[in-house]
């Protein structure tokens, strides 16, 4: 039986309508005082377009758009012209009232338009909610949702939820992270593999196995109280095949179809470099952008103005409702780039400080930088994305190679140095997301067999270079996972202690093993030191070509200077300090950030094998 989403999910007591004639209204409510006063309301019900729709209180409808499916209407109003907090949408036929809905225009929270978003001051902590902590066992399985919890299944639902994250905010804060990125938590009502959340079936509703819309907002508010931020993983490229609209499409071109294959399905060729290939064939570009990610993930057509408006309003709705601190957008280059430029601009026009990072999984800085706002490489291709931030996949791909191979002219730590030589391509290098793993990649601690030295090298690097560092849940206690052998489920293991039956609770630092403590304490020390270091957040960088497997760079501004040395060699290395004279200047010593010890500068400096050194320079 279909349900009244707005009434059930958001408890709008004033909503009252016939389930047959008026089944859904999206968005369920809106706000007064938006910079863009135009609001498009989707109303859905059997044959609704064949009826008369009016608004109460003399409110004028600016536009009613009918589509090929008579079960949909798209009503546009100007909220600046509405002077009542609530009005009624009425559906009539021959003066008979067939259904009604009381629509609310709420008052915006003070300062919401200028809400702070994540920046290079932050460290982002990535969580897969189903695998982090189970705070409410009663919602593990839900009668209205298909897949039930079964922790014995690697790819099944395990029961992690929003309450589990709320219960462990103190742990995340103590670690030193200041922004929390959750993989999607909107409803994903697919039959299997629903735990990852990327095949969403309702864009206005939190999956009830995670909790409620209200709990999601509570999580955000609890983070905000601690000067932390909640980052939503937003998906514009595809929805789940079980999405309620997929069962009754508003228009055929709401999604992309092909003439071949079952129901017009064609898998993407994933060659998103074709977006900027001036010589690309039309068919290859079409397969890259319009092909589906999978049979269960229909590819959304953002070129359709109604689709684009729906996605834009939904994004703004979540920002305003949940007091969000930013977006991460999945599979960004797979979308129509002109439409997405409008999407990003509409959001940042409404929220000028709001940060959006796109998943730009490409292999060269030229391709990645083209997706950042005001990029010269994008401009050369006749395009401006309006997207504030991109992910540094070049650094990500070079790091495991660099720390896992012998040194030569173009291998080892030289890979890291070379990756930074392309920074001139980015219009805003401080707004790059830097990372060495995430929920789709091999775990760093698996690659390096849980060697704390390798972890410390990697974390030192991403925490002290330009950009916004992102770490993945569990790495801070040495968690492993073999994607090659165990698939995605193995790199998304349950956090130990997130379930009552777990034999050990790693959230409790006193219960951590000696091995876990070594990872955790280094992470905690480094990230909490980073919090107050403007020189790391926005300072300039001076790189020195690696010597004997040691990469040295300085972060500096007018007030302070930090020297970072990363020894990737299997042996201790001694370097002549005169080589760094232009950056050391008249500094006489340095304070080791991790140990707290002072190091007097003499003629040389020795750094042990496979270690890093972070020195705050002092006179």
Image (cartoon, rainbow, N blue to C red):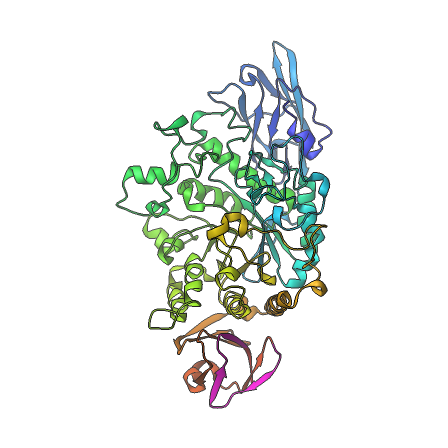
Which residue is the extreme one toward the left?
A: 279
Q: From the viewer's side, name the closer residue of 579 and 183.
A: 183
Residue 95, above or below 506:
above
Q: Which quadrant: the C terminus? A: bottom right
Give the extent of the magenta segment: 595-614
The verdict on residue 587 being magenta is: no
Q: Residue furthest top?
A: 94
Question: In the displayed structure, does residue 199 sit left or right of residue 32?
Answer: left
Up/down of 533 relative to 248, above or below = below
Residue 554 at x, y = what percent? 48, 75
| Left or right relative to 405: residue 192 | right
Location of the N terminus by quadrant is top right
Q: Is residue 122 above or below residue 591?
A: above
Residue 27 in percent (x, y) is at 60, 33
Indicate whether residue 612 is drawn in magenta. Answer: yes
Residue drawn at (71%, 63%) of the image:
511
Q: Position of residue 144 (x, y in %)?
A: 65, 30
Report the side of 481 relative to 366 (left or right). Answer: right
Quarter of the view holding residue 106: top right
**From what the image shows, is residue 31 above or below residue 382?**
above
Front position in the image: 441 or 331: 441
Q: Which picture quadrant has residue 146?
A: top right
Instruction: Residue 109: tell me if it is visible.
Output: no
- Count how many numbered circles sit on residues in the image: 0
Q: Which residue: 47% across, 36% down?
A: 297
Q: Nearer the viewer, residue 281 or 566?
A: 566
Q: Where does residue 603 sit, x and y in percent of width and height? A: 46, 90
Do we see residue 30 in this rendering? yes
């Amino acid at each position: 039986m279909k349900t009244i989403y707005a009434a059930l999910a958001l408890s709008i007591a004033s909503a009252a309508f016939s389930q047959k004639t008026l089944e859904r209204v999206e968005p369920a409510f809106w706000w007064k005082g938006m910079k863009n006063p135009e609001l498009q309301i989707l109303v859905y019900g059997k044959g609704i377009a064949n009826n008369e729709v009016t608004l109460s209180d003399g409110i004028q409808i600016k536009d009613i758009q009918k589509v090929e499916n008579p079960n949909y209407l798209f009503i546009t109003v100007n909220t600046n012209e509405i002077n009542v907090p609530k009005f009624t949408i009425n559906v009539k036929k021959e003066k008979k009232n067939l259904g009604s809905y009381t629509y609310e225009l709420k008052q915006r929270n003070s300062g919401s338009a200028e809400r702070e978003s994540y920046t290079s001051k932050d460290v982002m902590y990535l969580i897969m909610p189903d695998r982090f902590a189970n705070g409410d066992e009663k919602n593990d399985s839900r009668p209205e949702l298909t897949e039930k919890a079964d922790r014995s299944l690697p790819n099944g639902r395990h029961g992690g939820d929003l309450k589990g994250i709320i219960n462990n905010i103190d742990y995340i804060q103590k670690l030193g992270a200041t922004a929390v990125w959750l993989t999607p938590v909107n409803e994903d009502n697919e039959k299997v593999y629903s735990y990852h959340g990327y095949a969403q079936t309702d864009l206005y509703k939190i999956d009830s196995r995670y909790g409620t819309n209200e709990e999601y907002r509570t999580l955000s508010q609890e983070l905000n109280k601690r000067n932390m931020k909640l980052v939503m993983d937003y998906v514009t490229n595809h929805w789940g095949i079980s999405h309620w609209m997929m069962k009754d499409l508003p228009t055929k071109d709401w999604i992309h179809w092909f003439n071949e294959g079952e129901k017009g399905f064609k898998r993407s060729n994933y060659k998103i470099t074709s977006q900027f290939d001036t010589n690309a064939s039309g068919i290859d570009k079409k397969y890259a952008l319009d092909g589906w990610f999978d049979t269960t993930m229909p590819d959304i057509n953002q070129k359709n103005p109604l689709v684009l408006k729906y996605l834009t309003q939904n994004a703004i709705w979540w920002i305003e409702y949940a007091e969000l601190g930013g977006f991460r957008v999945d599979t960004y280059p797979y979308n129509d780039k002109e439409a997405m430029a409008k999407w990003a601009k509409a959001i940042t026009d409404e929220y000028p400080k709001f940060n959006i990072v796109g998943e730009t999984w490409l292999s060269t800085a030229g391709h990645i930088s083209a997706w950042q706002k005001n990029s010269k490489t994008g401009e050369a291709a006749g395009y401006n994305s309006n997207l504030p931030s991109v992910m540094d996949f070049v650094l990500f791909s070079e790091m495991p190679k660099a720390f896992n191979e012998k040194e030569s002219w173009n291998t080892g730590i030289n890979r890291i140095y070379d990756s930074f030589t392309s920074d001139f391509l980015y219009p805003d290098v401080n707004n790059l997301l830097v990372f060495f793993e995430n929920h789709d990649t091999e775990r760093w601690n698996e690659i390096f067999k849980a060697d704390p030295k390798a972890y410390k090298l990697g974390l030192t690097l991403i925490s002290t270079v330009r950009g916004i560092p992102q770490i993945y849940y569990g790495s801070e206690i040495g968690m492993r996972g073999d994607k090659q052998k165990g698939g995605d489920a193995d790199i998304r293991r349950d956090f130990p202690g997130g379930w009552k039956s777990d034999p050990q609770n790693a959230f409790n630092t006193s219960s951590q093993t000696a091995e876990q403590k070594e990872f955790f304490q280094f992470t905690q020390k480094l990230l909490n030191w980073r919090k107050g270091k403007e020189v790391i957040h926005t300072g300039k960088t001076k790189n020195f070509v690696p010597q004997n497997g040691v990469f040295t760079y300085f972060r500096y501004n007018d007030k302070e200077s930090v020297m970072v040395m990363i020894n990737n060699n299997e042996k201790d290395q001694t370097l002549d300090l005169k080589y760094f004279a232009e950056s050391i200047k008249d500094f006489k010593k340095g304070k080791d950030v991790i140990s707290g010890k002072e190091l007097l500068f003499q003629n040389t400096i020795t750094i042990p094998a496979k270690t890093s050194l972070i020195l705050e320079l002092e006179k």
